[in-house]
Image (spheres, rainbow, N blue to C red):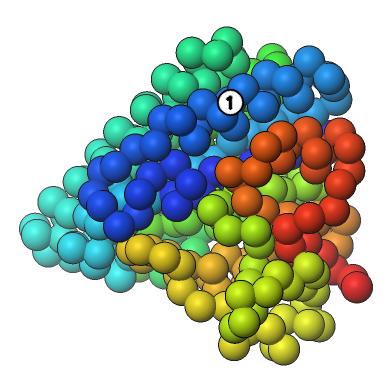
C-alpha cells in the first residue's frame, strides 16, 4: 500500500519566526517510520513537508503565488525555491541520521502549472524509488506557470496529483493540532463532500504565515480528492502525538479528523 505522509510546516518549523527549523519534530517522526518499517513491509511511503517559516515568509514578501512577471518577482521566485530546498535538506538530514533510506526529489524540476493548477508532474522516478524500497521526500514548491509565469504548488496539491498516478489509498497530514477544529475548538471527527458546507465556516486560516490557504485550503483540496477518488481517505492528526503513525497504520486507532467520500 502506498501512503502519503505530510509533515506540516507548523510541525517542523515555528511559522511565526522566519527560518526556524524544529529538528526534534522531524527526528521524532523519522524514528516512528523506522519502527513502522520494522513492524510491516507492506507500506510504500512518500514523505512530503510544508515550507513553514522558510518558504511562506519569502512567498508573502514577493506575492509569488499570484504570478511572476517582473524582475523583482523573478528574484523572489528563485528565492522561494531556494529556501524551500534549504528546509528540505534539513529534513533529509534527520531521516538519514536514523537510518532511513530517504531520497529527496525537487518537485519544481518536473512540475509545470497553468493558472496555479498542475498541468504536469512526472512521477515515474518517484514510482521507481518506491519499487527500490526508498522513501521519496518531496515538498511544496515553486512551479513555472505557462499563463502567469510562475506560482507555488502546495504539498497537498502535489499529493492529490500523485493519488491517481501511484494508486494511493491513504494520506496522513500531520500538524500541531488534533485535527480540524470547529469554532469552539472541538474536534470535527469526520468530513465528507456532503458535510463540508456545514463545517466550512469553522475552518479558519492556519497559525502564522501561510500563503497557500491554511486549513481551509487543505480541507477543500482533500475533500475534492476523495470525491474524485472514493477509495482514498485522508487523516489530519497531531504529529506531536506519541506513536501517531503506528497507532494509525498498525493499530488502526481512530483519532484526528478523517476525510472520506461517505459518512
Q: Which residue is mark 1?
A: 30
Residue drawn where x is 54% and y is 43% of the image? 7
Does 128 sit left or right of 194 as displayed?
A: left
Locate residue 253, reporting x and y percent: 86, 47
Tell me the quadrant of the picture where the C terminus can be found.
Answer: bottom right
Q: Quadrant of residue 256?
A: bottom right
Residue drawn where x is 80% and y is 39% of the image? 247
SS under mark 1: helix
Can residue 117 be seen at all in this image of the molecule? yes
Q: Is residue 175 positioned above or below 47 on the image? A: below
Residue drawn where x is 20% and y is 46% of the image? 79
Tell me the quadrant of the picture where the N terminus can be found.
Answer: top right
Seen as rendered, the residue at the extreme left is 71
Q: Is residue 70 positioned above or below 94 on the image? A: below
Can residue 119 be seen at all in this image of the molecule? no
Does 65 sit left or right of 218 as displayed?
A: left
Q: Quadrant of residue 98?
A: top right
Residue drawn where x is 30% and y is 33% of the image? 86
Locate residue 106, reporting x and y percent: 42, 34
Locate residue 158, reporting x and y percent: 56, 50
Does 156 sit left or right of 235 as displayed?
A: left
Amino acid at each position: 500500500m502506498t501512503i502519503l505522509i505530510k509533515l506540516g510546516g507548523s510541525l517542523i518549523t515555528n511559522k511565526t519566526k522566519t527560518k526556524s527549523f524544529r529538528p526534534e519534530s522531524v527526528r521524532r517522526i523519522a524514528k516512528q517510520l523506522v519502527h513502522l518499517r520494522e513492524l510491516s513491509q507492506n507500506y510504500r511511503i512518500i514523505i512530503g513537508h510544508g515550507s513553514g517559516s522558510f518558504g511562506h515568509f519569502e512567498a508573502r514578501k514577493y506575492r509569488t503565488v499570484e504570478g511572476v512577471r517582473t524582475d523583482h518577482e523573478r528574484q523572489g521566485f528563485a528565492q522561494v525555491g531556494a529556501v524551500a530546498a534549504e528546509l528540505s535538506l534539513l529534513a533529509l538530514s534527520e531521516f538519514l541520521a536514523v537510518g532511513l533510506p530517504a531520497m529527496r526529489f525537487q518537485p519544481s524540476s518536473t512540475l509545470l502549472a497553468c493558472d496555479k493548477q498542475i498541468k504536469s508532474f512526472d512521477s515515474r522516478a518517484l514510482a521507481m524509488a518506491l519499487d527500490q524500497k526508498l522513501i521519496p521526500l518531496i515538498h511544496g514548491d515553486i512551479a513555472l506557470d505557462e499563463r502567469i509565469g510562475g506560482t507555488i504548488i502546495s504539498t497537498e496539491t502535489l499529493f492529490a496529483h500523485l493519488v491517481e498516478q501511484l494508486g494511493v489509498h491513504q494520506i496522513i497530514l500531520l500538524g500541531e493540532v488534533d485535527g480540524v477544529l470547529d469554532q469552539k475548538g472541538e474536534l470535527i471527527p469526520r468530513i465528507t463532500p456532503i458535510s463540508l458546507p456545514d463545517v466550512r465556516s469553522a475552518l479558519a486560516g492556519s497559525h502564522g504565515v501561510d500563503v497557500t490557504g491554511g486549513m481551509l485550503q487543505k480541507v477543500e483540496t482533500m475533500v475534492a480528492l476523495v470525491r474524485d477518488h472514493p477509495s482514498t481517505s485522508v487523516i489530519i492528526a497531531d504529529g506531536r502525538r506519541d506513536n501517531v503513525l503506528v497507532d494509525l497504520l498498525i493499530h488502526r486507532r481512530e483519532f484526528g479528523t478523517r476525510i472520506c467520500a461517505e459518512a
